[in-house]
Amino acid sequence: MLTGHDGTHSTLRCGDYLGVRRDDGIVYVSITMRSGRTPAQKQALYRRIAELAEEHAGTEPRNVFVTVTENESADWSLGHGVAQYLVSSDRPQVCGDRAVAVRRGRSAR
């Protein structure tokens, strides 16, 4: 989902907030993922996103603003109003052209 902002009325964009000087080239990256990554893994992810944004889009790393929202199995409904990750099943679920076995809130390939 992309949302436009005017860039002038937010503490996230203003001046040297938390020691990072951003400008009109700011890019916001919002990631929703299952919980369980360590702080070190998240730091590595942030660095890699900034590297790739610079390499492929010319975005200065100081202008890459990343937020992560973590959640659990109960926080996902993939359709029909059902929390599929909470439903235990021994039969494979079809995901595109692959079969994915769903058991006790985890998917196993």
Image (spheres, rainbow, N blue to C red):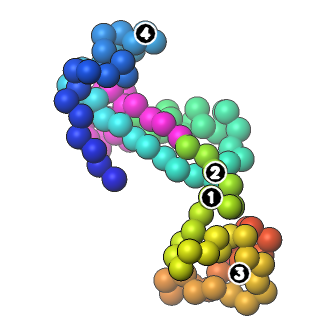
Q: Position of residue 31 (x, y in %)?
A: 48, 47
Residue 69 vs residue 25, the one in the foreground = 69
Q: Amino acid at mark 4?
A: Gly
Dot 1 and dot 2 residues touching (CB under 8 Å): yes
- Please state which of the two labelled residues, at mark 4 or mark 2, is closer to the viewer: 2
Quarter occupied by residue 41: top right
Q: Secondary structure at mark 4?
A: helix
Q: What is the number of callouts on the image? A: 4
- Please state which of the two labelled residues, at mark 1 or mark 4, is closer to the viewer: 1
Within-10-Å neighbours for mark 4: few <14, some 14–19, many 20+: few
Q: Give the residue at x 23% y 40%.
A: 4
Tell me how far mark 1 sits from mark 3, CA to CA. Answer: 19 Å
First in sequence: mark 1 vs mark 3: 1
Residue 6 vs residue 16, the one in the foreground = 6
Residue 71's disc number: 2
Q: Secondary structure at mark 2?
A: strand
Quarter occupied by residue 87: bottom right
Q: Which residue is mark 3?
A: 101
First in sequence: mark 1 vs mark 4: 4
22 relative to 102 in the view: left or right: left
The C terminus appears in which quarter of the rendering? bottom right
Q: Position of residue 70 (x, y in %)?
A: 61, 46
Residue 28 vs residue 56, the one in the foreground = 28
First in sequence: mark 2 vs mark 3: 2
Q: Which residue is mark 4?
A: 19
Within-10-Å neighbours for mark 2: few <14, some 14–19, many 20+: few
Query: Which span of residues is magenta-colored?
Result: 51-68
Residue 75's disc number: 1
